[in-house]
Image (cartoon, grey):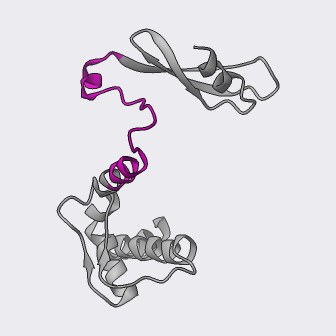
Amino acid sequence: MVHKQQMGCLIDDIIAGLCEALVRNYLNNVAKGKEIQKPIIFQGGVAANSGIKRALETELGTEIHVPQYYPVMGAIGSALLAREKMDGSEGSQFKGFGIVDVDCRTRNFICKECENTCEVVEFIMEERPISYWGDRCGKWEAQIKKL
């Protein structure tokens, strides 16, 4: 990018080039070997980027549709799949919608109990640790079963 700027390329052209590169990367790596069929629906946070949308349309040679609820479609789909899977015979760990009012925080610490020297993230709910992640040896992840 710096080189293109030094050559006098317009910022709009540089950004368009970045969008095109990202689209090529996606199609060559993530979508590689997958058939992309019409209609094409673009969802997720990146769908807000009109440059990426335009680059996708150019690369695929077709219109890309961005639905109204593009940022949350993945979450809605996951919730629908979870509802299908849960037939009521198993218990749920759903904390309820009141969870938004519960005091939750994270803290990071370096575990020096083995040679991995992991940066561990501890999730704390109402002053009680309920989850750990980031440990490579499994020591902290195993603590959850004991809590």
Relative to the observer, which residue lies in front, 55 or 134? 134
Residue shown at 46%/67% (left/top)?
1
Q: How many marks?
A: 0
Image location of residue 139, percent across then percent down: 72, 23
In which quarter of the view is residue 99 placed?
top left
Whether residue 62 appears in magenta in the rendering, the answer is no
Which quadrant would the C terminus be assigned to in this image? top right
Residue shown at 21%/67% (left/top)?
67
Relative to the observer, which residue lies in front, 126 or 22? 126
For residue 56, above or below residue 143: below
Image location of residue 65, percent across then percent down: 24, 75
Q: Residue furthest left?
A: 68
Question: Which segment did they paint magenta?
Answer: 77-103
The reply, left or right, for residue 65 in relation to residue 13 is: left
Image location of residue 133, percent across then percent down: 59, 30
Relative to the observer, which residue lies in front, 72 or 94? 94
For residue 137, above or below residue 127: below
The reply, left or right, for residue 132 in relation to residue 1 is: right
Relative to the observer, which residue lies in front, 94 or 17? 94
In which quarter of the view is residue 112 placed?
top right
Image location of residue 118, percent across then percent down: 69, 28
Residue shown at 61%/25% (left/top)?
120
Q: Residue furthest bottom?
A: 61
Residue shown at 33%/85% (left/top)?
38
Whether residue 99 appears in magenta in the rendering, the answer is yes
